[in-house]
Image: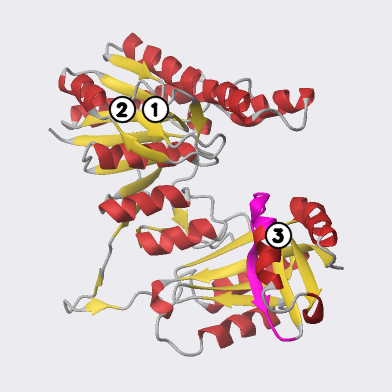
Amino acid sequence: MRLVVQKFGGSSLATRELRQRVVSHISAATKDGVSPVVVVSAMGRQGDAYATDTMLAMIREITPTPADRETDLILSCGEIISAAMLAIELQSMGMPAVALTGWQAGIVSDGVFTHAEIIRIKKDHILKLVMTGVIPVVAGFQGVSEDGEVNTLGRGGSDTTAVALGAAIAAEMVEIYSDVDSVMTADPRLVPEARPIKNIGYQEVLQLAREGAKVIHPRAVDIALQYNLPISLRKTGEGSAGTLVTHKKAIDDKGFIARDRVVNGITHITGLAQIRLHAPQAAGQEIETILEKISETGISIDLINLSPFERMFTVPAQDAQKTAEILSSLGYEPQVKAGFAKVSVVGTGMRGIPGVMARVVKALNRAGTEILQTADSHLNISCLIPERKVGDAVKALHLEFRLDI
């Protein structure tokens, strides 16, 4: 039996017309002899009645600090509504389908409210449905703990649900449908010349996702990498192949394994604040205490630079005030400045290639932007720059590494 998991994002489910396109993708899979297991997100986006952000806004009208347990119960309803609506759409077209909540689908979570992890999947019920010709439509973004509490999986949780299900049932592929048709070499809103990437490796798409590309949740890629599970990223309603994520190898016309481009994509994150501490204030093991105290509050720290003279790191701008308060409570006098962005070049081709950083600096100089911090690995080079220059910076990097051809 050939199995495939098809995941549909909220923007693909917002209206009856869009749901009909989703049905056509599911129908096409069955006609190809594939048995689909469907995963759905909550319908629509903020402002739409059942979207996650809409429900979250309703909760925060009551209190800015709602109980995590009740928040998870409310937020899980969005995906359940989507699953039931799509199942009814399929049934109306003569296709047997059953909507399943996370716990009905056998998804067991670790009990952590609002950002739980899937610890295992009891696959028997889903496989039994598939064997009898029924299409399971699973509510993504949720699971149930060992003691019966509903947990949500955090942002991008439906992607994680889909890939985890694909691994559990040994699917041949996970297809993730959204309102974009592929991974692009850069954000096309900033770079009109950006091109689709037809094939990309797990590590590269993982790095792109971590550095700001809104293509797939990094946790989902982690699972796919672990199980060597191909992912196809496609646009709902389109017949194009989109982007295939696998352990890819580029073969040239002579039959040799060819080096990929030095850089395969440019990505960016806006809305960052830089935190600076003079080194005498935070020497030795004290910096460890500082970083631990900040991370305990759930604030994400990035671009950490430690020198004998100064300690620097970035946080999301919305967390800057809270971070400053934490540091002040520890007796420090932080310098906090917002209005920054991080631009990154990503590609496995930069391994062992000298001069990549020089090209990055040259491109950013050409764009007229200063570089305030840098970080690098064998897969990416990231630079902190003024947010107002992010468009110019991304365009310059895209041109420098010839990603438009």
| Start-end of magenta stretch | 293-308
Image position, residue 392 (x, y; %): 69, 69
Mark 1 vs mark 3, foreground winner is 3
Q: Which residue is mark 1?
A: 22
Contact flag, marks 3 and 2 (Cβ < 8 Å)? no
**Is residue 86 placed above or below 372 in the rendered structure?**
above
Amino acid type of the residue that numbered disc 2 sits on in the rendered structure: Ile
Q: Which residue is mark 3?
A: 315
Q: Which amino acid is tagged 1? A: Val
The one of 45 and 145 positioned closer to us in this rendering = 145
- Is residue 241 shown left or right of residue 394? left
Residue 369 visible from this viewpoint:
no
Label 2: which secondary element = helix
Quarter holding the N terminus?
top left
Which residue is at a point 53% across and 50% down the rendered structure image? Answer: 214
Across and down, in percent, residue 294 comes to 69, 57
> According to the image, label 2 marks what residue?
26
Q: Is residue 322 above or below residue 160?
A: below
- The answer for how far apart the CA atoms under marks 3 and 2 are is 41 Å
The CA span between labels 2 and 1 is 6 Å
State the SS at label 3. Answer: strand
Image vertical order of residue 151 relative to residue 182, above or below: above
Q: Are marks 2 and 1 in contact (CB under 8 Å)?
A: yes
What distance separates the C-alpha of mark 1 from that of mark 3?
A: 38 Å
